[in-house]
Amino acid sequence: MHFAPLPYLDPGSGSFLIQLLIAALLGLGIAVRASWGKIKRWFGIKPKADEDDDESTE
């Protein structure tokens, strides 16, 4: 009779995987935030003109 052990993750491995997932999500969020202007230009969204600039020229 052949016995195959069941896969096992100890608590240290589980917490490492959770930390890895959280770090990946936060890193993705920071990367998107840092390049948000390029992403908007890629989709063809133009920035709105500031109305404050018109008032300062008077």
Image (cartoon, rainbow, N blue to C red):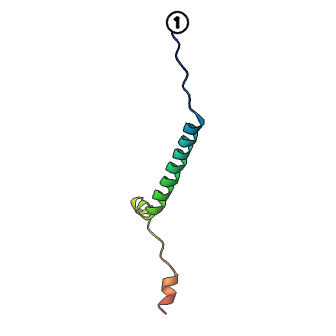
On the image, the x and y values in percent for residue 19 come to 55, 46
On the image, the x and y values in percent for residue 29 come to 51, 56
Please state which amino acid type lies under the numbered disc 1: Met
User: Which residue is more in the foreground, 29 or 43?
Assistant: 29
User: Farthest residue in the top direction?
Assistant: 1
Q: SS class of the residue under badge 1?
A: loop
Where 37 sits versus 52, above or below? above
Where 51 sits versus 30, above or below? below
Q: Using residue 23 as the reference point, say whether residue 11 is left or right of it.
A: right
On the image, the x and y values in percent for residue 51 come to 52, 81
Q: Which image quadrant is residue 6 in?
A: top right
How packed is label 1: few (under 14 Cα within 10 Å), some, or many (20 or more)? few
Q: Using residue 22 as the reference point, say whether residue 31 is left or right of it.
A: left
User: Which residue is more in the foreground, 17 or 42?
Assistant: 17
Where 32 sits versus 21, above or below? below
Residue with the mark numbered 1 = 1
On the image, the x and y values in percent for residue 38 come to 40, 62
User: Farthest residue in the bottom direction?
Assistant: 58
